[in-house]
Image (tube, rainbow, N blue to C red):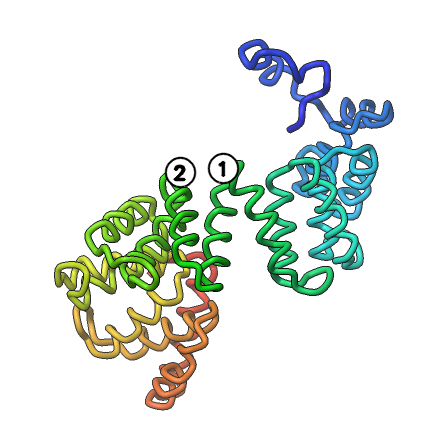
Amino acid sequence: MRLPPAFAVLPVALLTPWLALAEPTAVDLNAAAKRGEAWAMLELGRRSIGGDGVKRDQPAALRWFRKAAELGLAEAQFELGRLLLLGRGAESDPVGGVDFLHKAATAGWLPAQVALAEALASGRGGERDIDGAALWYRSAGMAGHLDAQVALARLSRAKGEAAEAESWLRRAARGGSAAGRHELWRLLRDGKGVSARSVEALQWLLLAVEQNYAPALADLGQAHIEGIDAQLDLAKGVGLLRRAADQGQPDALMALARLHLSGRGVVKDPVRALTMAELALTLGLADAKTERDALAASLKPAQIAEARRVARQWRDGRSF
């Protein structure tokens, strides 16, 4: 929550009792909003999104964010820009969304800089502008935004600038980014454009695994299954793949599907294999389609129905 201006300069130690004992009510916020307090408008907008003490109402949230944004509050411009870009609370207005994100980004709001860069890179709100995206990612990355550093590394790597990508990934990895550590492992392991450093690479991968980062869990699990980059250990590999699969990591799901089909390290179970292949495809692994279709063709209708039932259960929040 953004604090009223009168409280913004007080030490945290003095603010703590006020925050604990005097959390503004909806009545307080509406009164402050009527006085033209932008912070109150922003908070009412956020509460309207989540239904916190007020009715959940996205159109109302949009109106509050717009009022605060028009008063120049960067956080409100960011929230409004995101809603317009996604078409929530109103008709979709990507151009307007990008405009408000740009205002917030120019004011120095780091989340807005990253959101604007993402919009420019994807072409939402206009033509794709990779150079413009890189400028905003760089601005946020220089200020320490870890996701921006990783995104900038990806752009650099796509342009063949491996050294630049490594530099940004090292910043993100040292800052604690699991994604940065995982991607730095890939870069160092592959040695594309940089010297291959497998020992250091594995250290970064293990740090990402300690953070329970699903892509890292999947890759280390597969390494143990294959005995490449890690000691051959089927039990450990399967355990890591299951941890990644429980988070919806499609590569891990497909790897488990293959194991259940062959019975290597797990119980041979073509129905469970189909369940996991189905989920991997649903979650974005396009390469799973051929194997999914071939597996389904080998099963009876009742088995296919059972596999899909288990897949629905998983999507409802149950783990394997």
**Secondary structure at numbered mark 1:** loop
Q: Which residue is drawn at 16% across and 60% down?
A: 235
Where residue 314 sits, quadrant-wise, is: bottom left
Q: Nearer the viewer, residue 162 or 114?
A: 162
Q: Position of residue 59 (x, y in %)?
A: 79, 48
Q: Nearer the viewer, residue 42 or 96?
A: 96
**Secondary structure at numbered mark 2:** loop
- Quick check: 77 above or below 7? below
Q: Nearer the viewer, residue 215 or 25?
A: 215
Q: How far apart are marks 1 and 2 (CA)?
A: 8 Å
Q: Where is residue 203 in the image (x, y as percent from the top left)?
A: 24, 48
Residue on which disc 2 sits:
175
Q: Which mark is residue 144?
A: 1
- Callouts 1 and 2 close, C-beta under 8 Å: yes
Q: Which residue is drawn at 20% across and 71% down?
A: 267
Mark 2 is surrounded, within 10 Å at the Cα level, by few (under 14), some (14 to 19) or many (20 or more) other residues, namely: some
Mark 1 is surrounded, within 10 Å at the Cα level, by few (under 14), some (14 to 19) or many (20 or more) other residues, namely: some
